[in-house]
């Protein structure tokens, strides 16, 4: 079994700490190690370094080498430009198939918080057995703990035994609050972890059926990805394959997991002070409660506010009500328009 860590995302919801030149997978958000380093070391406990690969864009190859100097050059697969998870996974599958390799492949994000790896590894070993079957896709489904509107959900067949692989019946992307509340009340609904286990030939089969134009371009370019990559659509693997595929299975898992997709997700990882504040850097909250404060270089004082996100870095200053956090991802677009 090989591990493919996807590390080409932009992390726009963590602006201004996560910026295009250094997005969140290369930042230390939950420990002293960066998210990428944590992910790599998590898998290194169970597989040799020869079985771990990183796929990223050319823009970030230097950061990958810097943060993972032990990773061999040939174990970094480079996308010419960011195109979301479907082209990224298709490119990775072709990388192995063109070398005549079809071992089960774990495609995993680089920026998830999983503090305990043993349970993850046990689930992956179970998934590997299922994924060996032709055209079988296996996902890890996180047992939900709250009505989260920022995650995708998987609806499966009704479970009959603990730990079994369940046939996936539907994928639901980021439901509204009321729908999310309804979903978590069902025993056969799980968060979509974004971790998929499948063979490269399985990826090729579904790509050739559901994304024929994309697959034809990649397969026919003779490994010269830069000649065709700009023509590929920006599309997630969920929309490109999973919503159309048959033979998809979900293994429910109960370990601690978080997507670390936004500033407020840090409240589930870091211990707040007596007033409910998360403070990082040289910052002093006075008469302030339930806020997230991060500062670099400059001493920061926040007085008399609540439910705010205050972030100060050399790349910008963010002051945001938590209720409007979903709009942070638009900040970079705004800066681009304004020329910032």
Image (tube, rainbow, N blue to C red):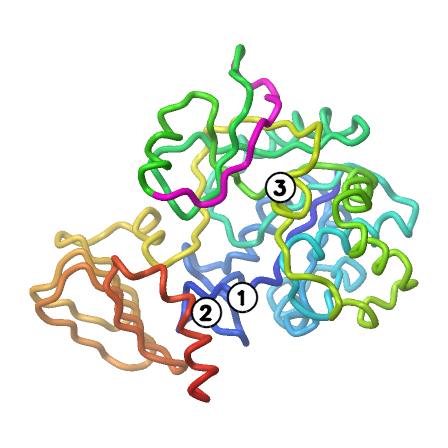
Query: Is residue 165 shown left or right of residue 29?
Result: right
User: Residue at position x 67%, y 45% from top?
Assistant: 107
Query: Is residue 123 shown left or right of residue 92?
Result: left
The crowding category of the residue bearing disc 2, from other C-alpha atoms within 10 Å (few below 14, some 14 to 19, many at least 20), is some
Pointer 1 or 3: first along the chain: 1
User: Residue at position x 23%, y 63% from top?
Assistant: 321
Q: Which mark is residue 326?
A: none
Q: How far apart are labels 2 and 3 at the CA level?
A: 28 Å
Pointer 1 or 2: first along the chain: 1
The crowding category of the residue bearing disc 1, from other C-alpha atoms within 10 Å (few below 14, some 14 to 19, many at least 20), is some
Magenta residues (range): 162-176
User: Residue at position x 54%, y 11% from top?
Assistant: 161
Quadrant, the N terminus: top right
Q: Which residue is mark 1?
A: 10
Q: Which residue is mark 3?
A: 45
Instruction: Say which element carries label 1.
Output: loop
Query: Quarter-wise, where is residue 310 in the image?
Result: bottom left
Q: Which mark is residue 18?
A: 2
Instruction: Say which element carries label 2.
Output: loop
Nearest the viewer among 13 and 162 is 13
User: Is residue 49 shown above or below 71?
Assistant: above
Pointer 2 or 3: first along the chain: 2
**Comparing marks 1 and 2, which lies closer to the viewer?**
1
Q: How far apart are labels 1 and 2 at the CA level?
A: 8 Å
Quadrant, the C terminus: bottom left
Instruction: Residue 192: give x, y in percent of width and height.
Output: 52, 38
Instruction: Say which element carries label 3.
Output: loop
Instruction: Residue 142: give x, y in percent of width and height.
Output: 48, 33
Q: Are marks 1 and 2 in contact (CB under 8 Å)?
A: yes
């Amino acid at each position: 079994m090989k591990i493919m860590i996807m590390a080409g995302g932009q992390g726009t919801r963590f602006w201004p700490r996560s910026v295009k030149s250094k997005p969140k997978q290369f930042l230390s958000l939950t420990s002293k190690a960066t998210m990428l380093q944590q992910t790599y070391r998590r898998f290194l406990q169970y597989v040799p370094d020869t079985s771990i690969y990183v796929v990223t864009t050319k823009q970030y190859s230097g950061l990958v080498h810097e943060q993972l100097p032990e990773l061999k050059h040939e174990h970094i697969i480079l996308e010419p430009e960011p195109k979301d998870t479907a082209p990224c996974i298709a490119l990775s599958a072709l990388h192995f198939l063109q070398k005549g390799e079809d071992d089960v492949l774990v495609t995993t994000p680089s920026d998830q918080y999983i503090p305990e790896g043993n349970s993850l590894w046990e689930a992956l070993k179970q998934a590997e057995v299922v994924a060996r079957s032709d055209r079988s896709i296996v996902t890890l489904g996180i047992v939900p703990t709250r009505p989260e509107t920022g995650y995708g959900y998987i609806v499966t067949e009704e479970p009959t035994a603990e730990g079994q692989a369940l046939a996936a019946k539907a994928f639901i992307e980021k439901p509204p609050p009321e729908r999310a509340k309804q979903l978590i009340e069902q025993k056969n609904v799980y968060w979509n972890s974004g971790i998929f286990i499948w063979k490269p030939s399985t990826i090729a089969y579904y790509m050739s059926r559901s994304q024929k134009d994309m697959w034809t371009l990649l397969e026919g370019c003779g490994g010269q990805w830069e000649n065709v990559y700009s023509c590929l659509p920006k599309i997630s693997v969920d929309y490109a394959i999973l919503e159309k595929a048959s033979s998809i299975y979900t293994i429910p898992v109960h370990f601690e997991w978080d997507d670390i997709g936004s500033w407020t997700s840090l409240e589930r990882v870091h211990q707040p002070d007596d007033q409910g504040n998360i403070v990082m850097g040289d910052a002093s909250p006075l008469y302030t409660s339930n806020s997230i404060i991060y500062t670099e270089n400059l001493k920061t004082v926040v007085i008399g506010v609540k439910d705010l996100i205050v972030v100060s870095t050399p790349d910008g200053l963010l002051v945001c009500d938590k209720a409007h956090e979903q709009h942070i991802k638009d900040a970079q677009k705004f800066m681009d328009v304004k020329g910032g």
